[in-house]
Amino acid sequence: MSTIALMGAGGKMGNRITRNLKDHPDYTTLYVEVSEAGRASLAELGVSVTPQDEAMKQADVVILAVPDALIGKICSDIVPKLKSGTMVMGLDPAAGYAGVLPEREDITYFISHPCHPPLFHDETDPEARRDWFGGVKAKQNIICSLHHGPEEDYAKGEAIARTIFAPVMRAHRLTTEQMAILEPALVETLALTCFTVIREGMDEAIRMGVPEPAVRDFLFGHIRTTVAIVFDFAGAPVSDGAKLAVNQAKGQIFQPDWKKVMQIENIEKSVKAITKAEI
Ligand SMILES: NC(=O)c1ccc[n+]([C@@H]2O[C@H](COP(=O)([O-])OP(=O)(O)OC[C@H]3O[C@@H](n4cnc5c(N)ncnc54)[C@H](O)[C@@H]3O)[C@@H](O)[C@H]2O)c1
């Protein structure tokens, strides 16, 4: 049986992971948490915390459910203390891609990240339908990278990732760089920015006097249908009128060189800012 030390067990990801690990027959889990609020949330889940140094001595696997900006500092403290062969699992590619994980030849670094439950799904259980982030009731996919370490550790890392993010459908194996192209670049820098602007447009429609319930009903229905059309789920083409609107508005809303946010040098800057690494 492997011993897992869960760093940041009382945070958002830590709490979800705690629920999936605490009664799991394959793993003994030690919970490490520094904040009072985090410790209180762990007490509510019926688990107690272990001092960091004690947990590091025993750990076969360390999961970093801690803020990305602290990962470099925390790892420079804990990694020298780990047993040879320990796997350190990150939940985001930023730290690995920014180069803030301390080099130690006999330590494995594995990175896994949830895709979150898909927009189009077959969930019928109300609890699963309200599981916005995954790891509770809704099925989701995940991405994984063996950032550093022997090939046989990939299967071990994927098995743990499937447990902490359960229930999992597909696990995609990527490189750390490919993970960073997906997040932050694709889903945060690009998609979140576009959705933030759409939200501002919604607020503008309400400010202009359209009743909010009508705005929300109309927008969310159209978001679903538009995604189904644009991403080829619906098998229906974009109408000629809609194409014309997009062609006219695109140059007004976006800079012609917007794709530079997806360029590797921009992604490198972005992960360094997220992890507070030297630029
Ligand atoms: N929040 C999400 O939905 C989400 C999704 C995917 C990946 N992630 C990744 O998960 C990781 C954690 O993010 P989060 O949103 O859960 O953060 P969070 O801020 O909610 O929780 C972090 C926890 O770490 C604790 N902590 C800080 N320093 C510590 C230390 N030295 N020792 C032990 N505990 C310490 C904090 O007290 C807090 O409880 C990040 O790498 C993030 O990118 C988060």
Image (cartoon, rainbow, N blue to C red):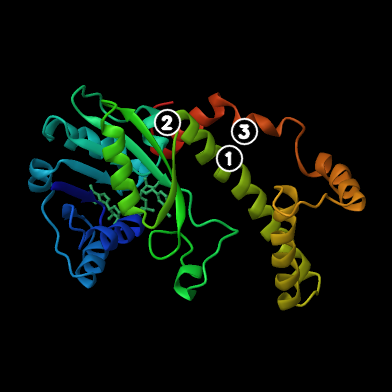
Question: Is 28 placed left or right of 172 in the picture?
Answer: left
Query: What's the amino acid at mark 3?
Result: Val
Q: Quadrant of residue 104?
A: top left
Residue at x 54% of width, y 56% of height: 118
Helix, strand or loop at mark 3: helix
Q: Quadrant of residue 86?
A: top left
The percent coordinates of residue 105 (x first, y second) are: 21, 21
Q: What residue sits right under mark 1 in the picture?
A: 186
Frontmost residue, 39 versus 132: 132
Q: What residue sits right under mark 3 in the picture?
A: 261
Q: Quadrant of residue 205?
A: bottom right
Mark 3 and 2 residues: CB-CB less than 8 Å, in contact?
no
* Disc ID at residue 82: none
Frontmost residue, 265 versus 64: 64
Q: Earlier in the sequence, mark 3 or mark 2?
A: 2
Q: State whether label 3 is within 8 Å of ligand 1.
A: no
The percent coordinates of residue 254 (x first, y second) are: 76, 40
Query: What's the amino acid at mark 2?
Result: Thr
State which mark lies toward you, 1 or 3.
1
Quadrant of the image for the C terminus?
Answer: top left
Residue at x 22% of width, y 33% of height: 76
Looking at the image, residue 150 lies above or below residue 228:
above
Disc 2 packing (10 Å; few <14; some 14–19; many ≥20) = many
Q: What residue sits right under mark 2 in the picture?
A: 176
